[in-house]
Image (cartoon, rainbow, N blue to C red):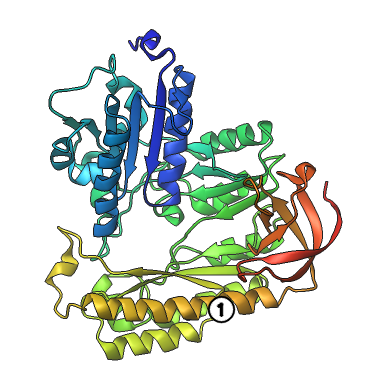
């Protein structure tokens, strides 16, 4: 039994690394602590509790986690420090030895942080609680509001793919999900709070249904029927799992936006085989063509990893030319990071850091060319923008249905509101389009 009187007038700070799913889960943790009477510390206040939600996708992410721990311990020397997340799952004993850390919680304990706070007395030696990820069966739900307008609904966790470069199956366990009914109820809860947009998140969301005998298409159709939600976005879905049925359904849905994020990871068949990906470049190109044919206005984001073992200069050139020919809207470029325990370490042909950087810069520049070209197609056209609360002294921003960033002068009444506009030209740094004309508020 938790003694919540211990938490009276206590304050917490939160630090998150990694993916949208992690940020969603941190927001849920924050809400849980707030319901127990622990408020979020304001800037400059000393906190009684520090929560670090870690990432392990790269060496840099792990380094940033350790740096965050050291910084928070210096800023809040008397605080009870909890580390959770993927790095915590993979390296719990190591993190428990970091100065100031009190508890390290594995992936299955992320939803139980309150149970481990005790009376907030710091431990002489950090404690850790994990079990092998392969044995994790529980699903920790998360439906939380981001820092602006969108809500993030976690529909799935874990992954069964075991790509050679990736630690996620070891950090988050096997693929699992709740029932469609429970997710629909959470979406209804978002609508009752006035939320207009939900981003569907998970590790491998197209794999939804493995643990309940349902499927992702059924989930999409059920969520689409929830009254009060204006927009859904699918965060990221494997190319072999985004079916023609889902694409076709999105085309006739009023609530699922023409916006897809489809990981490619490599534009060379040889490298895809080394990665143990479940498609080749021909399949991927056909999938993009299908999306573009059925959803001609869709914003298509694509993940690409550069500098994996075995990616020779010739194979990278093949990949670059293949990606250049894809009709996509933006690239998310990552430099390969060697992960302990992954099969990629046995592959010959390591790429130097300098070469990884060169390849990364080439693809980032290509990405900007594609994004700007995509935006240019819509200058002068009408679009509906869901505006977000602006930061102080900053323009008001929001996104069109097909994920074009739009800015205008702040108007308080437009926050969390769908507004029909005519799109103008680029802003000063070409990161967004401006509003040429306000046409009216959508109902």
Relative placement, left or right, of 27 versus 123 is right
Spot occupied by residue 254 in the image (x, y as percentages of width and height) = 72, 55
Q: Quadrant of residue 425?
A: bottom right
Q: Quadrant of residue 217?
A: bottom right
Front residue of 123/285: it is 123
Which residue appears at 80% of the width and 73% of the height?
380
Which residue appears at 42% of the width and 31% of the height?
29
Front residue of 195/54: it is 54
Spot occupied by residue 260 in the image (x, y as percentages of width and height) = 55, 63
Spot occupied by residue 370 in the image (x, y as percentages of width and height) = 56, 78
Front residue of 27/100: it is 100
Check disc 1 and report its element: helix, strand or loop: helix
Is residue 208 visible to the viewer in this orientation of the structure?
A: no
Q: Quadrant of residue 177?
A: top left
Which residue appears at 21% of the width and 32% of the height?
100
Which residue appears at 45% of the width and 56% of the height?
206
Front residue of 279/271: it is 271
Relative placement, left or right, of 297 versus 140 is right
- From this view, report whether residue 169 is shown above or below residue 369: above
Q: Residues within 10 Å of mark 1 (few under 14, many from 20)?
A: some
Quadrant including the N terminus: top left
Relative placement, left or right, of 208 versus 98 is right
Spot occupied by residue 232 in the image (x, y as percentages of width and height) = 62, 51
Is residue 66 visible to the viewer in this orientation of the structure?
A: yes
- From this view, report whether residue 331 is shown above or below residue 439: below
Q: How many marks?
A: 1
Q: Would you name the residue on which mark 1 appears?
A: 370
Relative placement, left or right, of 160 versus 199 is left
- From this view, report whether residue 152 is shown above or below residue 284: above
């Amino acid at each position: 039994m938790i003694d919540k009187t211990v938490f009276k007038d206590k304050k917490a700070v939160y630090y998150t690394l990694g993916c949208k799913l992690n940020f969603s889960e941190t927001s849920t943790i924050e809400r849980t602590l707030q319901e127990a009477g622990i408020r979020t510390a304001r800037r400059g206040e000393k906190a009684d509790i520090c929560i670090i939600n870690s990432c392990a996708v790269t060496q840099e992410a792990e380094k940033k986690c350790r740096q965050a721990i050291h910084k928070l311990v210096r800023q809040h020397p008397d605080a009870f420090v909890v580390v959770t997340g993927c790095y915590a799952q993979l390296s719990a004993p190591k993190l428990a030895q970091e100065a100031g850390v009190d508890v390290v919680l594995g992936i299955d304990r992320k939803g139980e942080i309150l149970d481990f706070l005790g009376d907030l007395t710091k431990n002489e030696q950090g404690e850790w609680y994990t079990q092998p990820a392969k044995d994790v069966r529980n699903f920790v739900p998360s439906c939380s509001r981001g820092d602006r307008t969108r809500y993030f609904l976690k529909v799935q966790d874990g992954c069964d793919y075991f790509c050679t470069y990736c630690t996620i199956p070891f950090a988050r366990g096997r693929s699992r999900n709740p029932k469609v009914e429970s997710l629909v109820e959470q979406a209804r809860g978002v609508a009752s709070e006035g939320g207009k947009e939900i981003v569907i998140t998970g590790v491998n969301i197209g794999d939804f249904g493995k643990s309940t005998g349902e499927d992702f298409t059924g989930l999409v159709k059920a969520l689409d029927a929830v009254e009060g939600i204006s927009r859904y976005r699918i965060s990221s879905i494997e190319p072999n799992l985004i079916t023609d049925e889902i694409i076709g359904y999105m085309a006739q849905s009023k609530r699922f936006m023409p916006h897809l994020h489809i990981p490619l990871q490599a534009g060379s068949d040889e490298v895809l085989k080394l990665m143990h990906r479940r498609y080749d470049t021909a399949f991927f190109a056909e999938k993009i063509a299908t999306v573009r044919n059925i959803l001609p206005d869709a914003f298509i984001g694509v993940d690409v990893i550069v500098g994996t073992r075995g990616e020779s200069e010739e194979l990278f050139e093949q990949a670059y030319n293949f990606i250049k020919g894809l009709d996509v809207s933006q690239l998310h470029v990552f430099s390969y990071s060697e992960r302990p325990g992954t099969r990629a370490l046995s592959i010959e042909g390591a790429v130097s850091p300098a070469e990884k950087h060169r390849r990364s810069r080439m693809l980032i520049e290509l990405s900007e060319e594609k994004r700007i070209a995509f935006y240019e197609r819509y200058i002068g056209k009408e679009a509906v923008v869901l505006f977000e609360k602006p930061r102080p002294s900053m323009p008001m921003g929001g996104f069109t249905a097909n994920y074009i960033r739009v800015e205008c002068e702040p108007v308080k009444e437009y926050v969390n509101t769908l507004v029909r506009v005519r799109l103008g030209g680029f802003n000063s740094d070409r990161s967004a389009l401006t509003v040429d004309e306000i046409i009216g508020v959508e109902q």
